[in-house]
Image (tube, helix red, strand yellow):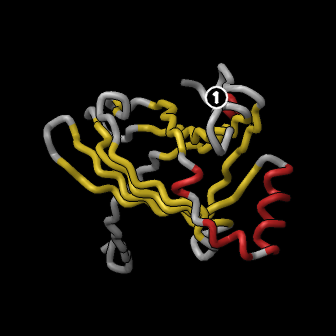
Amino acid sequence: AATEFLSVELNFRPKPMDFLLAVTCDIIAFDSPMPPFYSVVVHLRVKNPIPQEVHFHRVQLEARHLNLQGPALYHYNHDLDTRKFMLLPNEERTLDFELSPLHEVSWGFLFSPTEIAQLLSEAAVQNVTGGLLVDLLLSINDGYNQVIPYKNEAISIQLCFRPTRPSDVCGGLPP
C-alpha cells in the first residue's frame, strides 16, 4: 500500500495567545507639589484575544531588572476599576497605570553600584529591559473568573522623560 511507510506525528498544544503588545513609561517631572515631586505612568498596549468582553479586577506584578533572574525593581499589587480596565471582544487598546514609586519600588538595588550604573545607562537611551511576573484576575463576560499568569523573561520598555504631563502617550501608542 502507498501509506505503508508513512509515519505521522501529532502534537496537540494550545496556540499561544499574546495579549501584551508593548510597554512604555512616562516619567513626568514637577507633576506633584508633594514628594517625590514627579509621577510615573506605565502604558500597556494590550489585545483581548478572545471574542468576549473581559474585565480586569486585580493585577499583581513584579518587575525585575534585565530578566527574571535580575534584582526586583517594582511590585504593583492593586484592585482595578472594572469599568475602566476592560476590553471588548478582540479589542486592542492602551491601558494606563499610575505608579506609586515611594511605596512600590524595591529599594534593594540602591546597594549595588553596578546595578545603578546599568539602570542609568539604560535611562540615558530611554530604554530599560526587564523581566515581568504578572497575575491578572479577570472576569469574562459570561461570568467566568480566571487568574491569568503572565511571564516575560526580558521585555523592552521605552522610557519618556517629560517636564510636564503630556497630551500624548510615550512611544506614540494609540489610546
Residue appearing at x 68%, y 33% in the figure: 170
Q: Answer with the quarter of the image where residue 169 lies.
A: top right
Residue appearing at x 69%, y 40% in the figure: 27
The extreme bottom residue here reads 5
Q: Is residue 32 above or below residue 79?
A: above
The extreme left residue here reads 143
Q: Residues within 10 Å of mark 1 (few under 14, many from 20)?
A: some
Instruction: Give the quarter of the figure containing the N terminus.
Output: bottom left
Determine if residue 51 is in view: no
- Mark 1 sits on what residue? 169
Position of residue 79 in the picture relative to residue 102 (left or right)? left
**Residue 9: percent from left, percent from top:** 36, 74
Which kind of residue does numbered mark 1 sit on?
A: Val
Position of residue 28 in the picture relative to residue 74 (left or right)? right
Instruction: Give the quarter of the figure containing the C terminus.
Output: top right
Residue appearing at x 34%, y 70% in the figure: 10
The extreme front residue here reads 34
**Residue 57: percent from left, percent from top:** 29, 44
- Quick one: 171 or 29, which is closer to the camera? 29
**Residue 78: percent from left, percent from top:** 38, 49
Determine if residue 67 is in view: yes
**Residue 119: percent from left, percent from top:** 77, 61
